[in-house]
Amino acid sequence: MYNDRKAILTARAKVLKAMAHPTRLFIIEELERGERCVCDLTGQIGADVSTVSKHLSVLKQAGVVLDDKRGNQVFYSLRVPCILNFFGCVESVLESNAREHATLLEAVGK
Amino acid sequence: MYNDRKAILTARAKVLKAMAHPTRLFIIEELERGERCVCDLTGQIGADVSTVSKHLSVLKQAGVVLDDKRGNQVFYSLRVPCILNFFGCVESVLESNAREHATLLEAVGK
DNA sequence: AATATGTTTGGCAATATAACCAAAAAGCCA
DNA sequence: TGGCTTTTTGGTTATATTGCCAAACATATT
C-alpha cells in the first residue's frame, strides 16, 4: 500500500472527479466569467433545474465553487481562480490523442 | 444545450475522469520518475495485478500513458510530461478546503 | 514440449453516478 | 395569508466503476 501518499492523492482525486463531467466543466467556464445564479446556468445547459442544482452541489462539496444566497436566488462563483489555467495540460493530452488518431488514419491509407 | 462547447468539454472530462482515482494518481506520480512495469507498480500499490492492469488501461485509453511491451513485461510511461504541474491548482483548492475547515473549527471554539 | 513469469480479459458483486420527476423549502410580492 | 419564483431534496431507474478471482495469453526458460 502507498500509505504515505494515499490521503493526499484521495483528496486530489476528489477534486478531479468533481470536475470530470462536461456539464460541470461548462459551469466552471461560465463562472470564470463571473458569478451566475442557478437559473442562468440552467437556461444555458438545457437540463432540468434539479440536475443543474445537483451538479453545483458536487462542485461545492469538492470546494471548487462558493454559493451566496441573495434573496430568492443562489449565486455561484469560482472559489479558486486558477481553475481554468489548469487545462493547458489536459489540452496537450487531447492534442496528442488527435495526432495519434491522424497518424493511424494515414497508416490505413486515409 | 451548450452545443458548441460540448464536444471539447466531453473530451476534457474524459481525461480528468481517467485521472480521478487515488491509485491512478499514484501511478502518474510514479511514472513521472520514469517508466515502470506492471509488476513494479503492483508491488507498491498492493492490490491485485488485474486491478492495477485495469487502472493502467483506463489511463492508456484516455491518452495519459503509453505502453511498451519488451519481452515478458509491459512498461508504462507518461505520454504528456506536464501532467504533474497540473496539480498546482488542485492543491489550491485543497488548501482552501483546509483553511475553511480550520475556520469552522475555530468558530465552534476549537 | 512443459513450466514459470508477467499481463490482460471476463465475470461477478458492491457501490456510485446521472438524469428526470415530484415534492418540499425559502424568499418575494400582492 | 396565498400565490409565485427559485432552489434543493427525495425517489427511481439506468448505467458506470471498482475490486477481486479465475482463466486466458504471451513470452521466456528448462
Image (spheres, coloured by chain):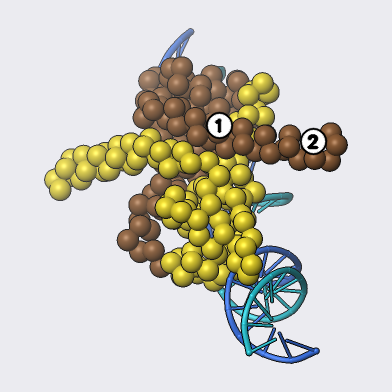
Chain colours: A brown, B yellow, C blue, D cyan
Nearer-N-terminus badge (2/1): 1
Please state the horizontal and vertical placement of residue A21, each as a whole percent of the image.
Answer: 57, 38
Horizontal arrangement in the rendering, residue A106 relative to residue A97 (left or right): right
Please state the horizontal and vertical placement of residue A14, each as a whole percent of the image.
Answer: 44, 47
Give me the C-alpha separation between circle 2 and circle 1.
23 Å
Circle 2 SS class: helix
| Pair 2/1: label in front | 2
Q: Residue at x 63, y 70 (%)?
A: B72
The amino acid type found where label 1 is placed reads: Glu
The residue closer to the viewer here, A13 or A31, is A13
Residue bearing the label numbered 2: A106
Of all chains, the one bearing label 1 is A
- Residue A91 numbered tag: 1
**In the displayed structure, would residue A72 be above or below residue C13?**
above
Q: Residue at x 79, y 37 (%)?
A: A105
Horizontal arrangement in the rendering, residue A25 relative to residue C10 (left or right): left
The residue closer to the viewer here, B17 or A58, is B17
Please state the horizontal and vertical placement of residue C22, each as a whole percent of the image.
Answer: 64, 38
Q: Residues within 10 Å of mark 2 (few under 14, many from 20)?
A: few
Please state the horizontal and vertical placement of residue B71, each as a whole percent of the image.
Answer: 64, 67
**In the displayed structure, would residue A1 be above or below residue B65?**
below
The residue closer to the viewer here, B50 or A49, is B50
The amino acid type found where label 2 is placed reads: Glu
Q: Quadrant of residue A67?
A: top left
Residue furthest right as drawn: A109
The quadrant of the image that shows the N terminus of chain B is: top right
**In the displayed structure, would residue A20 be above or below residue B9?**
below
Q: Residue at x 57, y 37 (%)?
A: A93
Q: Quadrant of residue A103?
A: top right
Circle 1 SS class: helix
Asked whether the viewer can see residue B25, the reply is no
Q: Residue at x 36, y 37 (%)?
A: B88
